[in-house]
Image (spheres, rainbow, N blue to C red):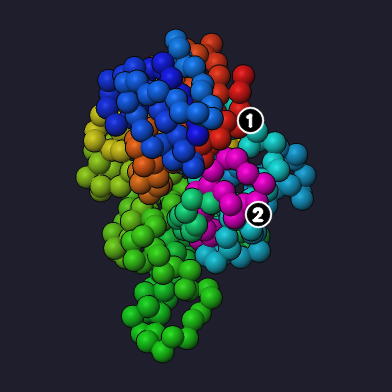
Amino acid sequence: MLLIVNGLLHTMESDTPQKADILVNEGKIVKIKKKIEPSEGTEVFDAENLNVYPGFIDAHSHIGIAEDKISSQNDMTNENTNPITPCIRGIDSINPMDNAFHNAIAAGITGVMSGPGSSNAVGGQFAFIKTYGRCIDDMVVLAPAAIKIAFGENPMSCYGINGNMPSTRMGIASLIREEFFRAKQYFSQNQSGNEDFTLICYKELFEKKIPLKAHAHRTDDIFTAIRIAKEFDLDLTIDHCTEGHLIAQEIAESGYPAIVGPSLASRSKDEVSLSDFKTAGILHDAGVTVAITTDHPVSRIQYLPLCAGLAAKEGLGESAALRAITIDAARICRVDHRIGSLKEGKDADIVIFEGNPLEINSCVKATIINGEIVWRN
């Protein structure tokens, strides 16, 4: 057992911090109380003058797939041989030995959504994983956790430049529609139990157990993603949402959440020319549920708290910024029943800070995953 005492708890179940102790046993938070006396054999961590938060979450990344060691064998982000690859699974390329996992843990990031990149119109399956472990199967919280689709420059530049489809935004949308039409027919007509491997992977998507994860920067691409999701009655997350501040009310009316970022990156292509840290705050004020992403390795994953701090400065506010990397991110990723807040019964994924994590001079004193102290400063 582990007992964290004397800390100031930011539970994300409430906006008001509270001085309390946390008792952890068998990977779970079993008690939160003003004062808990340690039993014999309990490890005690004194968090006096420290801030205690749920572990941070990056809701969109390619950690372990695009590894820190840059080479053709360390970047498995895209299967660039076919624009439609729904059945590929991120867990088959995520390497837990990637140095970025150590960086994430040292920054208090305990959970990530990771999966294939954005070169394909339909790119494959994301997984939500913990950041500590050696075997990916033991790190998984939810897999599949989303089906990736992508709009805009990436699919067009990957395939259109070679004279293949898609070479236009219309072509991207058409490929996605054709694929979903095939899948819808398959599920409505297949009563014999004969499984098509390239279509059965959509089962959780069409049952609304997982969302589409739409790479969309420009306003027109965001609207197309929403249009297609509505046509096929699918859930959706709008990832990047770079120009979302221009259509915040329309996004709010769609009911879909936004995963905003990477704002701490260069404006390396036309469709991110309006990238700004103000986007998250404008969306939040319009009523959109918002998470913050680094899109690692576009921005390095350890800068997630800094990105949240810059979004807070540019209008999101401190409370919403913290939620955007904890409970709101967990809800968007559909893992809030296990993580995202400090609550009895949830996984003991906890980060202990000296100072405010949204400020540059703060310091992680300990990171706890599944009740185990995996980083201590």
Horizontal and vertical percent for residue 149?
47, 56
| Count of numbered circles on the image | 2
The residue lying furthest to the front in this view is 40
Q: Secondary structure at mark 2?
A: loop
Which residue position holds label 2?
93
Q: Is residue 32 left or right of residue 111?
A: left
Measured in 3D between alpha carbons, the distance from the residue under mark 1 to the one under mark 2, in whole angstroms, is 19 Å
Residue at x-position 25% and y-position 47%: 255
Residue at x-position 40% and y-position 80%: 186
Horizontal and vertical percent for residue 291?
39, 36
Quadrant housing the C terminus: top right
- Residue 194 shows in this picture: yes
Is residue 200 positioned above or below 339 on the image?
below
Is residue 251 positioned above or below 8 on the image?
below
Under mark 1, the amino acid is Asn
The part of the image, by quadrant, that contains residue 83 is bottom right
Horizontal and vertical percent for residue 32?
34, 29
The label shown at residue 103 is: 1
Of residues 180 and 14, which is closer to you in this image? 14
Q: Is residue 99 left or right of residue 129?
A: right
Pointer 1 local density, CA inside 10 Å: few below 14, some 14–19, many at least 20: some
The residue lying furthest to the bottom in this view is 192
Contact (CB < 8 A) between labels 1 and 2?
A: no
Range of the magenta residues? 122-139
Residue at x-position 32% and y-position 26%: 33
Pointer 2 local density, CA inside 10 Å: few below 14, some 14–19, many at least 20: many
Horizontal and vertical percent for residue 206?
36, 67
Under mark 2, the amino acid is Ser
